[in-house]
Amino acid sequence: MSAWFESQRIAFIAEMLHIYGFINREHLMKKFGISMPQASKDLQRYQRHSSGSMRYNPSAKRYEAT
């Protein structure tokens, strides 16, 4: 997979967190036509590189901006 596509997904995660305050795997899956495992990887990658900017809310099943 191209680094350009990955960077687009990472930028989308940042934008969703900034505008709406949350994101989940389904948002990525619908926007980019990717699989659930790929969406999970992207969210984990974003969380690793932007530590402290989002946390998972298990009751809402989404990542929320911190």
Image (cartoon, rainbow, N blue to C red):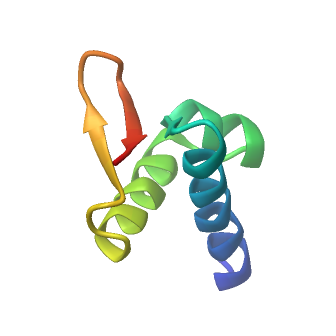
Picture layout, residue 17 above or below residue 60: below
Q: Residue 55 location in percent, x, y?
A: 28, 45
Residue 60, relative to residue 28: is it above or below?
Answer: above
Q: Is residue 63 left or right of residue 21?
A: left
Q: Nearer the viewer, residue 26 or 50?
A: 50
Q: Percent from the top left, x then y, of residue 48?
A: 29, 70
Q: Position of residue 54 (x, y in %)?
A: 35, 51
Of residues 61 and 22, the one drawn nearer to the viewer in this rendering = 22
Residue depicted at 66% across the width and 44% down the height? 19
| Residue toward you, 12 or 18 | 18
Q: How many marks?
A: 0
> Taking 5 as reference, is 41 left or right?
left
Q: Quadrant of residue 15?
A: bottom right
Location of the N terminus by quadrant is bottom right
Residue at image coords 54%, 47% = 17
User: Which quadrant of the figure has residue 46?
Assistant: bottom left
Left or right of residue 31, residue 24 in this image: left
**Relative to 7, does residue 46 appear above or below in the rendering?**
above
* Residue farthest to the top, as pictured: 59
- Residue 11 falls in image quadrant: bottom right
Q: Residue at x 37, y 71 (%)?
A: 50
